[in-house]
Amino acid sequence: MYLQLARRLLLETDKRLLWKLAYNMGYKGMRSVQKHKQRLRRGEVFPPFLHVSVINSCNLRCQGCWVDVSAKQSRIDAASMHRLITEAKEMGNSFFGILGGEPFLHPELIEILGQHPDCYFQVFTNGHFITEEIARDLRRLGNVTPLISIEGNEVVSDVRRGRPQVFSRSMAGLRNCLREKIFTGVCTSLCQTNIDDLLHEAWVDRLIDLGVMYLWYHAYRPAGPEMCPELALTRDQQIRARRFVVEMRVRKPILIIDAYYDGEGRALCPAATGMSHHISPSGDIEPCPVIQFARESIHGHRTLRQQFLESEFLQDFRRTAASATRGCIILERPDLLKALVDRHGARDTTARGGARAELDAMRPSPSQFNPGHEIPEKSWAYRWVKKFWFNDFGAYARFDPPGRIQGPEKESGHHAPRPEAAPPAAAVNPSVPTVS
């Protein structure tokens, strides 16, 4: 399998782009994590991986979207992005996730990516605006990997994303990237209506045949003004997804990314461990894209380093999240988030001004944290990478063993409640999307 994957990378990807991936994202990414470890020993947290939502606008209206896609356009301009990236590079960072809205609606996106050839950018996109010309621009830049979101077959995609012909237009953008031999991925927010379609070996095989180099599955999180909790995965489905990913990693010549487990199969949250935080289209510094509250902003006289290292709000978030669960605090303990927001007087960063009411309306749902059901990595390569460069860095020292909380909570006999599994959807379309 490893030889097949190496062959695919060498034959199906532009060699210059492959070098950019290996050096800017691989070598320099590992170096940024080493710097992160050194900072942790000094009690300092500056995330080695930053996710930046550059614009709120989008052409789709997805179920459960928390972004203000219908509001007046808000975006981070090129000058502010240049300052942000430059100050992050001074801390050793080289990798940035670019989100939206739809990032390719940002009129300065290509210019922004081109200003920093020593960095690597993963652009989360629906693919609709990746024309042949844009794909050629991405190949010319060489330091960009498009991660194209596919949310189901032709029928399911239209329902999930609120517009017609979504699947075909996403596939057109995907093919434009692959024709240019760009290192390209596909991501899916697994939910009740697409899990049987896309968490499927036949779908993985079709993507390999097309030339897709990596996959990223993540669980749907009910949030935002229309959160659609009925789409959330059950606990058994979370375990099923983890088992599928582990099996495919040792059988298929395609990279499968996840940010929610260590090499032993123990759950983790990148925001709780300090690996990643999020910057909104208005420049607010948030724990993660779904938690739309902040005390700090990239705009102002303080440097990015000062904002992160001196943020009591982010420090308290990491402490609170890691003390409550190894999983997703948004899903499991929205009550703790409400208390956190109140403690710090964090401002609502949405244009709609409804984030606090939405948090009040949230009910606990299962997350990736399933004590007693850990599924360790079978791939020696993934275990090795996670051991050294993507683990919890001691953030969950209070859990021993997983699920049993040490400290005051244990002494008082109080344990955080475990949410019940979400109810299954009434119907699921089992067909595999056609991508011929």
Image (cartoon, rainbow, N blue to C red):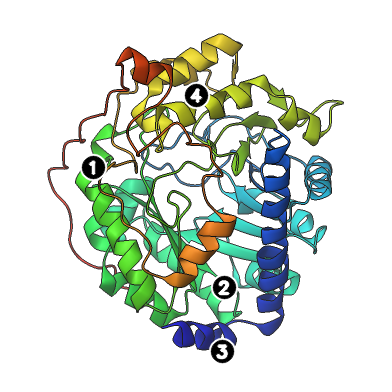
- Disc 1 vs disc 3: which is toward the camera? 1
Residue 257: percent from left, percent from top? 47, 61
**Label 1's element?**
helix
On screen, residue 266 versus residue 365, left or right, reads: right
Q: Residues within 10 Å of mark 1 (few under 14, many from 20)?
A: some
Which dot marks residue 322? Answer: none
Residue at (53, 32) in percent of width and height: 68
Pointer 2: what residue? 177
Pointer 3: what residue? 11
Q: Looking at this view, is 288 or 262 the one in front?
A: 262
- Disc 3 vs disc 2: which is toward the camera? 3
Residues tagged 3 and 2 counted as in contact (Cβ below 8 A) = no
Which dot marks residue 320? Answer: 4
Residue at (39, 38) in percent of width and height: 327
Instruction: Give how far apart the Cα atoms at labels 1 and 2 are.
Output: 35 Å
Q: Looking at this view, is 193 or 242 the one in front?
A: 242
Instruction: Give how far apart the Cα atoms at labels 4 and 3 are.
Output: 47 Å
Q: Earlier in the sequence, mark 1 or mark 3?
A: 3
Q: Earlier in the sequence, mark 1 or mark 2?
A: 2
